Image (cartoon, rainbow, N blue to C red):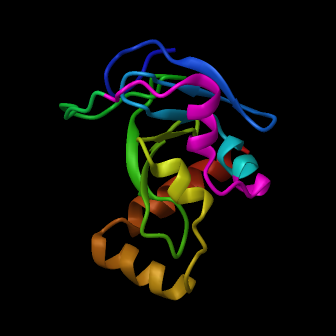
Amino acid sequence: MKCPRDGSELARVSVGDVELDKCHQCDGIWCDRGELERIRELQLSQPEEQLERQYGNPEPRTGETSGYMKCPRCGGRLQGVFYMLGSSIRIDRCEDCFGFWLDDGELDGLASHRPAAASKSLKTEEESGNLPSMLRSIAKWFQTS
């Protein structure tokens, strides 16, 4: 698979018993559907640090991606979303296969995230204009489940 950020080949890496795909150029990580939740269940405090110890930590190259990013798994469009209700953390999710692209540092942020009140998050979603998009994504997820 290719990195949606810079086109580099993604390498298979493991966090606990969960296999992920990591770009060693931009330090991004691809999580197939369900893998991010499995990592959170492990309750690791710094999963990216664990990956760096195991697989090295080359200096990440950062750069702006023009246009939208494509899913490395299915080629669908990656859309920026809040990870969960109560989260201020925005990540990129595939609209088709529901995998997640995490930029450098986002996995550690999600691993330690504790959701705030759902009503506050829902209000934030409404104010940011993401509520219709979020509801479409939820409906699509139920259709594919």
Q: Residue at 77% across / 56% down in the picture?
A: 41
Q: Is residue 64 left or right of residue 48?
A: left
Q: Is residue 40 left or right of residue 112?
A: right
In magenta stretch: residue 95: no
Q: Position of residue 111 (x, y in %)?
A: 61, 57
How many marks overall?
Answer: 0
In magenta stretch: residue 42: yes
Q: Which residues are magenta?
A: 40-60
Residue nearest the observer in this picture, 135 or 94 = 94
Q: Position of residue 60 (x, y in %)?
A: 34, 29
Residue nearest the observer in this picture, 67 or 26 = 26
Q: Position of residue 130 (x, y in %)?
A: 36, 65
Q: Residue at 46% across / 61% down in the picture?
A: 134
Q: Is residue 52 left or right of residue 132?
A: right
Where on the picture, by quarter, is residue 97?
top right
Residue nearest the observer in this picture, 58 or 40 = 58
Q: Residue at 35% across / 16% down in the picture?
A: 7
Q: Position of residue 129 (x, y in %)?
A: 30, 69
Q: Quadrant of the C terminus?
A: top right
Where on the picture, by quarter, is residue 139?
bottom right
Q: Is residue 144 visible?
A: no
Position of 141 relative to 66 (above/below): below
Position of 130 relative to 101 (above/below): below
Q: Is residue 68 visible?
A: yes
Q: Residue at 55% across / 82% down in the picture?
A: 116
